[in-house]
Image (cartoon, helix red, strand yellow):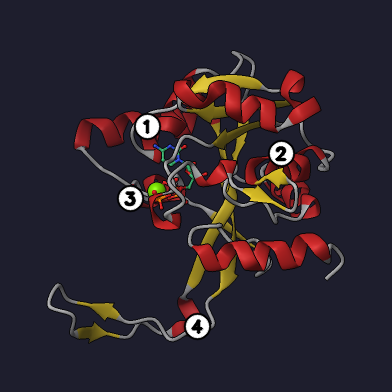
């Protein structure tokens, strides 16, 4: 299975003054732990890291011995653009791809393999968890508009897996129509193409704000939790 790891963000919500993937977590960088988890999955055959050119050395050095086993791809201004660059840099024979955020360093390798397996039967799959909070739709003035039924709400995670040709087509349509989305499954939905949900776990958070670093440290120190 081919993997793409978007790692070209700036981490603005983390407020660390640098790409959050370069933050130290228990003696290694955040991206190191992500790559380590991916290499622990048995389904991987090829991995591309998508990063900003000016961070190439820092990111590759920080993943230590894994750096010789990954391909480097230049990222874009948005996650969507970074993934599109990644898709265009896959080897010609890549039929399927799993995309996993560099910022999700707590992913369970068995769930990565489950996504790869489900992608044998489906054109598109994503890991997601049932939402536990009651979610409100809010207007631009800060007043609640409606409360969607929680039974139908899932929080999207990564990996997200796709047939390469189909995802490339979706990205090209998005460019034409000026769609800007925060995950790849959103493109499939807009086109009415089916995406299968695979139930993931709550541990697979996207490290976004400073409090997430504390959660990540706790899990890295208690891997069997
Ligand atoms: N990403 C990317 N290229 C971009 C923006 C984001 O490859 N131009 C990657 C990030 O590095 C991250 C993943 O997409 O691994 C998910 O994005 P997010 O959590 O939003 O990370 P950042 O964009 O870095 O953070 P923020 O939105 O707080 O600035
Ligand atoms: Mg972002």
In screen coordinates, is 143 left or right of 132? left
**Residue 141 point in image, percent of width and height:** 12, 78
Q: Is mark 3 within 8 Å of ligand 1?
A: no
Q: Is residue 101 something that shows in the picture? A: no
State the separation of the CA atoms marked 2 and 1: 21 Å
The residue lying at 33 percent from left, 33 percent from top is: 77
Report the front residue among 183 and 103: 103
Residue that carries the numbered disc 2 in the rendered image: 35
State the separation of the CA atoms marked 4 and 1: 33 Å
Name the mark on residue 143: none
Name the mark on residue 190: 3
**Residue 111 point in image, percent of width and height:** 74, 54
The residue lying at 63 percent from left, 67 percent from top is: 214
Instruction: Determine whether the residue tagged by mark 3 lies in a helix, strand or loop.
Output: helix
In front of the other: label 3 or label 1? 1
Residue that carries the numbered disc 1 in the rendered image: 81
Task: Count residues near mark 3 (Cα–Cα under 10 Å), then give few for <14, some for 14-19, many for 20+.
Answer: few
Name the mark on residue 151: 4
């Amino acid at each position: 299975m081919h993997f793409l790891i978007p790692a070209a963000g700036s981490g603005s919500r983390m407020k660390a003054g640098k790409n959050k993937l370069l933050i130290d977590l228990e003696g290694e960088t955040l991206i190191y732990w992500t790559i380590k988890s991916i290499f622990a999955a048995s389904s991987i055959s090829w991995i591309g890291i998508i990063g900003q050119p000016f961070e190439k050395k820092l990111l590759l050095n920080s993943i230590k011995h894994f750096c010789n086993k990954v391909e480097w791809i230049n990222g874009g201004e948005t996650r969507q653009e970074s993934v599109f660059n990644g898709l265009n840099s896959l080897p010609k024979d890549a039929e399927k791809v799993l995309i996993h955020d560099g910022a999700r360093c707590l992913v369970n390798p068995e769930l990565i393999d489950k996504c790869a397996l489900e992608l044998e039967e489906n054109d598109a799959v994503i890991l997601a968890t049932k939402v536990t909070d009651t979610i409100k739709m809010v207007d631009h003035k800060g007043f609640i508009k409606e409360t969607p039924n929680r039974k139908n709400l899932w929080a999207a995670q990564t990996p997200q897996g796709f047939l390469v040709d189909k995802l490339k087509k979706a990205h090209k349509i998005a460019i034409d129509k000026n769609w800007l989305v925060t995950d790849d499954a959103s493109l499939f939905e807009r086109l009415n193409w089916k995406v299968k949900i695979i139930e993931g776990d709550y541990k697979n958070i996207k490290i976004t704000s400073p409090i997430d670093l504390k959660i990540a440290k706790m899990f890295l120190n208690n891997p069997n939790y």
